[in-house]
Image (spheres, grey):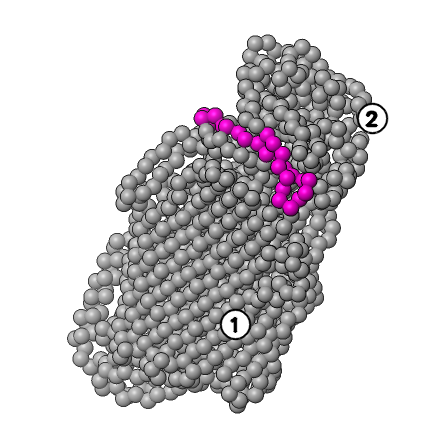
Amino acid sequence: MKSLKIIQINKWFLFCVMLLLISCEKDITVDLPKPDPKIVVDGYVEEGEPIYIILTRSEPFFSPITQNSLVNSVEKGATVTVSDGITTEQLMEIDTVVNGVTLRGIYFTPLMRGTFERKYSLNVHTTKGETVTASTYLSQPIPLDSIWFKVQENHDTLGFVWAHLTDPDTLGNCYRWFAKRLGKDDDFIAPFGSSFEDKFINGQSFDFAYNRGSVDNSSAPDDNNIEEGFFKTGDTIVVKFCSVDRSVYEFWRDAETQVSNNGSPFASPSNIKGNVVGGLGLFAGYSAAFDTIIAK
Amino acid sequence: MKTIFSFLLSALFCFNVSAQNKSNRYTLSGYVKDSKTGEALLGCNVVIKEMHKGTNTNTYGFYSLTIDSGTYNLLINYIGYKDQLIPVDLNKDQSININLDPTTIETKEVEIKAERADRNVNGTEMGRVQLDVDKIKSLPAFMGEVDILKTIQLLPGVQSAGEGNAGFYVRGGGPDQNLILLDEAVVYNASHLFGFFSVFNSDAVKNMTLTKGGMPAQYGGRLSSVLDISMKDGNDKKLHGSGGIGYIASRLTLEGPIIKNKASFIISARRTFIDLFLRKPFIKAGSAAEGNSYYFYDLNTKLNYTISQKDRLFLSGYFGRDVFNFRSAQTGFKVRIPWGNATTSMRWNHLFSDRLFLNTSLIYSDYKFEFQANQQQFDFRIFSGIRDYTAKVDFNYFPNILHNIKFGGNYIFHRFTPTNAYARSGDVVFDLGKVTRIYAHDAAVYLNDEWDITEKFRVNIGARGTLFAHVGPFTRYVPDPVFPERYTDTIIYDKNKIVKTYTNVEPRFSLRYELNKASSLKASYTQNYQYVHLASVSAATLPTDVWVPSSDRVKPQFATQYALGYFRNIKDNEYETSIEVYYKHMKNQIEYREGAMPDQNLKNNTDNNFVFGKGWSYGTELFLKKAAGKFNGWIGYTLAWTQRKFPEVNGGEQFSPKYDRRHDVSIALTYNRNKRWTFGLVWIYATGDALTLQTERYAIAASPPISFSEGTFSNNFYVLGNYGKRNAFRQKAYHRLDLSATLHGKQKKRWQGEWNFSIFNVYSRMNPYFIYFNVEGNTQDGNLQIQAKQVSLFPIIPSVTYNFKF
């Protein structure tokens, strides 16, 4: 759905104006008020996996982000519970070191596992006495009919992953796309514009394509040369296609809009709509269906 | 309000009767024209010297004075022209057409006569400025393109929306609250190149009048101002041409008689050539930039035919387009964005008698925007626009020297095309909704009398009755209360079925009290309704902005304005000064709901995404102008406040709109050194724009970060911002100095060349255009830093333009 993203129009406008004009820029210091830090939830529900959240606090906009600040911004000692409509379970806080990073502020369910067609309700109670809540639904996944790799015209071995989707007749389906090249990517990566809804495609059966996403500020050679954004023949590609709540779609739509609009004089400032009541962030259920192809 | 109407109607009837009864009264009437070009001169003073009383010519250069028989001297004066004194022995109705000679640079200082009626002090108009385009041509122009919209932004009370934005704000009102008329046709988008230049080619424009307060009843439909632009009629004496070559565009104008002194034409064209110039040799075939281009062009034409002293026909047209092309050779992504206006007006002037002037107009106005994108099997198209068909009658009745009565009516049929889209992937057409159009009837009647009650008191009293009906076919999507961008139900209205009707009466009143010959006090009270609205998702005005009508959901915007002013002329009218204070209250103001996305206009009613609130503004404007002489120009200063309050915006707290500027200063000066050299200077200062910034940030994983089964953790986060209060931050102040020098060729030659040298932003002030945040480093290395960067568009830019006339 990337080529249909209307938000990109603003970028083209800006690009055009910039092309035509001589512009100059300089660093400035902006004096902003220091707001009270808000609770930030980054939570996940996936089928067969523990339910977990990363709990942090927002920080002043210009404060530098270091290992320390990441550690300091986590929210420890909170009482966190999740209910799946049948049982309610208190989450355990992990305090562990992975890849040299001390992970704190991560809470997970020791017993409960994500199950399709259940609604999960989160309740966080901090040591300071604040309460935030959120809920998400883990629906049955809607798998892609098929996926294939197609070389882009005049691009030799480079191309995009194509997919065929049949959207169910009911309005309100939302999706998010991730992909991973086995042996090349550590994790599933969501390309820009990874989330879409069925407002304009309800009940239709159609083809679409995604380019390859990259991790933030990637230093990998193929993220910094002509192969950037492309899959390549020979790649083994796993596509993780998820059905998501509307709030998940809206969060990522808004977040990507914000990132792409950064400072654009043509954009309007608006906050990202999350589903966390009393705080920031997102509690997301991802109903995944997996597909693997070898690009040729 | 109906009482005002009936009062005025009966008053009108009485004048008519009394005028007929007084057999010793006669009428002096005619047209005032430029002796060299035959152009009608509007707004000229026509005064009976002995009575110190007179009138002004109307838009078509017509005047009419009904006075007792006697011997008089008729004095006609107009800035930039030599005064004319005509002795008249009035013992019957007389028609006198007057040709005024323009003053040239070699003419010595214009003699300013003490008895000359000066409109600044004498008229009831407040907040009204008239500019001759020839007068502004010696001011510095950005990249040498004389731009009338940029010039009016140098007037107090009119604020520029900034570089790269042709929008302007009048007395705290939004950019859609200005009615821009080109030969009576509404121009819905007055900008080229996303706002860097206006659509008005200065070679084709004669005159413009800006009304920002005390709006007379013949104008309506907008809350804040009217910019009335008159195109040149075309020289009816001799064939002439003019043109210019500049950095941005080239211009060519031809004008001349079709039948000498009776019929004439003008045709004026302008096109940018930067795309032609860049294509070869700078852009190599096969390079990434190949296939990218941008151009705009416009064409103005006008024909006029004087059938007799009683009848005159005008036909004028404007057509302009901007076209932007983008093609990515790498991905095959192609974009084409054309947009522009087209207008046509047909007008017929008829004199029923030498005291009753009629103009009838038929007008067509159209604005279109389109975005076409294509990548392999994907096609995507968005389009929007507005089209108006207008019929209009305007009477101007001069019963006697004490009254100048205007009345008439107009009817507009609007066809709105809100954002529509079409998308296709191969053979599958996505369902983006049916092409929607919205139809509305928009009618108005008005009556306005400018009346000298006593020697000292003059009032301008009027009222405008308006009717707006939104009619079918129309589909109302009833929004879901939980997800307002989705709908639960639709209501279908058949063709011509009325969806919603609004009727209103707008009183207009202004008063002048003359303290003495050189000074006066003025006051005005006006109410205005606005039935069409421009909703903008962004803070800037863009060609993508869509006009929408008042509907069952959108109430008309409404404003009440109060103004007071002191006007004084110094040194026998050599200097004009004024100070005005105003307070304006605006109801039913419109904003997009916070977080609204452009695609929510599809398969939905645009107005379902709106929220409504109120606004108010107040301020004071100081103006000092020297209209004549070798050294002339003006200084303006505005001290102003404007605020908005929307229950659903900024948590219900009041906020400053972007253009709430405390101080605005503008200086515009020209110096005619001698026959060859003219110098110009512009300096402006404006308080920085209000801006909303993110005050805090947080991190969210780009994809689920932990895999418990594989025991992995990824550290790939999005850093997201959270905005603080709406427009709580201010950009740095904007100021800039521009200089120009014009070298005129020898006047005697048939071909007259002229070089214009301009320096924009002389001291290269880095004015803020926008601020963005650069994220440096990354979360994986834990050295992420956010740095604010201010982008400025234009450093010092010199330019040279060559203009010619033949």
Location of residue B633 in the rendering, given as x and y in whole percent from the top left corner: 55, 74
Location of residue B371 in the rendering, given as x and y in whole percent from the top left corner: 50, 50
Q: Is residue B674 above or below residue A212?
A: below
Location of residue B632 in the rendering, given as x and y in whole percent from the top left corner: 55, 77
Q: Looking at the image, can residue B673 be seen?
A: yes
State whether discs 1 and 2 lie on one chain: no
Q: Is residue A161 magenta?
A: yes
**Whole-number angstrom distance, CA of label 1 to CA of label 2:** 67 Å
Instruction: Specify start and end residues of the magenta stretch as a single range.
Output: A147-171
Identified at 54% across, 16% down, the residue is A117
Q: Are marks 1 and 2 in contact (CB under 8 Å)?
A: no
**How packed is label 1: few (under 14 Cα within 10 Å), some, or many (20 or more)?**
many
Label 1 resides on the chain identified as: B
Under circle 1, the secondary element is strand
Nearer to me, B267 or B223: B267
**How packed is label 2: few (under 14 Cα within 10 Å), some, or many (20 or more)?**
few
Location of residue B597 in the rendering, given as x and y in whole percent from the top left corner: 52, 40
- Residue B672's disc is none
Identified at 27% across, 79% down, the residue is B309
Left or right side of B523 for B777: right
Q: Looking at the image, can residue B643 be seen?
A: no
Label 2 resides on the chain identified as: A
Under circle 2, the secondary element is loop
- Residue A100's disc is 2
Identity of the residue furthest to the right in this view: A100
